[in-house]
């Protein structure tokens, strides 16, 4: 996995702050493969059922924390 320990901690903390402590974060895409280079960070956040409005607000909050 091509993420530093600091990046992993920041992603986990941002997801917990935005979606709640039960949120689970999954990395997928090219960052999973150590042999590849570059690429964006593709994340899937798994959490309890949320309405689309609430989920969007949580996503925006998480993105703001990661910038």
Image (cartoon, grey):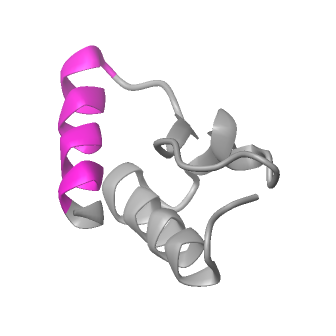
Magenta portion: prevailing SS class: helix
Does the segment drawn in magenta span residue 53? Answer: yes
- Give the magenta-colored segment's residue range: 51-64
Asked if residue 15 lies left or right of residue 17, the reply is right
Q: Residue at x 44, y 57 (%)?
A: 15
Q: Position of residue 23 (x, y in %)?
A: 55, 50
Task: Please state which of residues 56 and 49 is positioned toward the viewer in this rendering.
Answer: 56
| Numbered label tally | 0
Asked if residue 3 lies left or right of residue 43, the reply is right
Task: Please state which of residues 2 and 9 is positioned toward the viewer in this rendering.
Answer: 2
User: Which quadrant does the N terminus fall into?
Assistant: bottom right
Q: Quadrant of residue 47?
A: top right
Task: Please state which of residues 15 and 21 is positioned toward the viewer in this rendering.
Answer: 15
Q: Position of residue 62 (x, y in %)?
A: 29, 53
Q: Residue at x 46, y 42 (%)?
A: 40
Q: Residue at x 61, y 76 (%)?
A: 4
Does the segment drawn in magenta span residue 9? Answer: no
Q: Quadrant of residue 54?
A: top left
Asked if residue 23 lies left or right of residue 13, the reply is right
Q: Position of residue 18 (x, y in %)?
A: 32, 55
- 62 w.r.t. 16: above or below: above
User: Which quadrant does the C terminus fall into?
Assistant: bottom left
Q: Position of residue 49 (x, y in %)?
A: 48, 25
Q: Residue at x 68, y 61 (%)?
A: 2
- 26 w.r.t. 9: above or below: above
Q: Residue furthest bottom?
A: 6
Q: Is residue 47 visible?
A: no
Q: Is residue 34 visible?
A: yes
């Amino acid at each position: 996995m091509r993420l530093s320990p600091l990046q992993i901690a920041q992603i986990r903390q941002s997801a917990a702050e935005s979606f709640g402590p039960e949120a689970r974060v999954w990395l997928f895409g090219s960052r999973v493969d150590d042999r590849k280079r570059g690429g964006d960070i593709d994340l899937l956040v798994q959490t309890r059922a949320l309405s689309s409005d609430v989920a969007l607000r949580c996503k925006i909050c998480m993105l703001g924390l990661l910038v």
